[in-house]
Image (tube, helix red, strand yellow):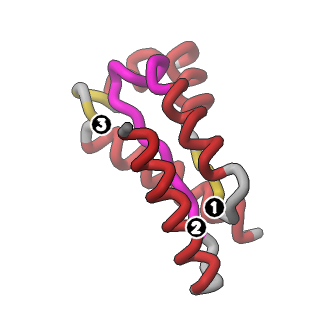
């Protein structure tokens, strides 16, 4: 049921963005304990957005790479939810995505 509601919200957001001629994105943010487990839900939500103009920004690969190469840095991003360091990391991730998608 939650995924159905999420899909409806995604479709509504896409419609508003298209009406306003705005570039919009969905940014996935994970809880520490749900990074691997949330992949199924992210895949379902991605399917809902696939035929829309919405960009999907998912830091999963970056987080998994960090977990392998720098586990202490990875752990510092979370205290169940993201810590201030984690929020700063997400802000930087979003900044980089904005640059990449705006050509700047």
Tell me which label, 1 or 3, sits earlier in the chain: 1
**Badge 3 local density, few (<14 within 10 Å), some, or many (20+)?**
some
**Mark in front: 1 vs 2:** 2
Picture layout, residue 55 above or below residue 61 = below
Whether 23 is among the magenta residues is no
According to the picture, the residue beneath numbered tag 2 turns out to be: 14
Q: Which residue is located at x 53 percent, y 49 percent?
A: 93
Q: Between tags 2 and 3, which lies in front?
A: 2
Position of the N terminus, as image quadrant, is top left
Q: Which residue is mark 3?
A: 82
Chain part drawn in magenta: 24-38
- Tell me if label 1 and label 2 are in contact, CB under 8 Å: yes
Q: Nearer the viewer, residue 59 or 25?
A: 25
Q: CA distance from mark 1 to mark 2?
A: 6 Å
Residue 32 is covered by the magenta coloring: yes
Residue 54 is labelled as: 1
Residue shown at 44% from the left, 15% from the top: 71
Q: Are marks 2 and 3 in contact (CB under 8 Å)?
A: no
| Image coordinates for residue 92, horizontal then vertical, percent | 49, 52
């Amino acid at each position: 049921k939650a995924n159905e509601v999420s899909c409806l919200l995604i479709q509504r957001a896409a419609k508003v963005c298209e009406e306003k001629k705005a570039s919009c994105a969905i940014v996935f943010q994970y809880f520490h304990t749900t990074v691997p487990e949330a992949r199924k839900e992210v895949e379902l939500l991605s399917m809902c957005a696939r035929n829309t103009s919405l960009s999907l920004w998912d830091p999963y690969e970056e987080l998994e790479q960090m977990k392998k190469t720098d586990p202490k840095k990875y752990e510092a991003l979370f205290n169940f939810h993201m810590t201030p360091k984690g929020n700063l990391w997400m802000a930087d991730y979003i900044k980089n995505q904005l640059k990449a998608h705006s050509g700047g």
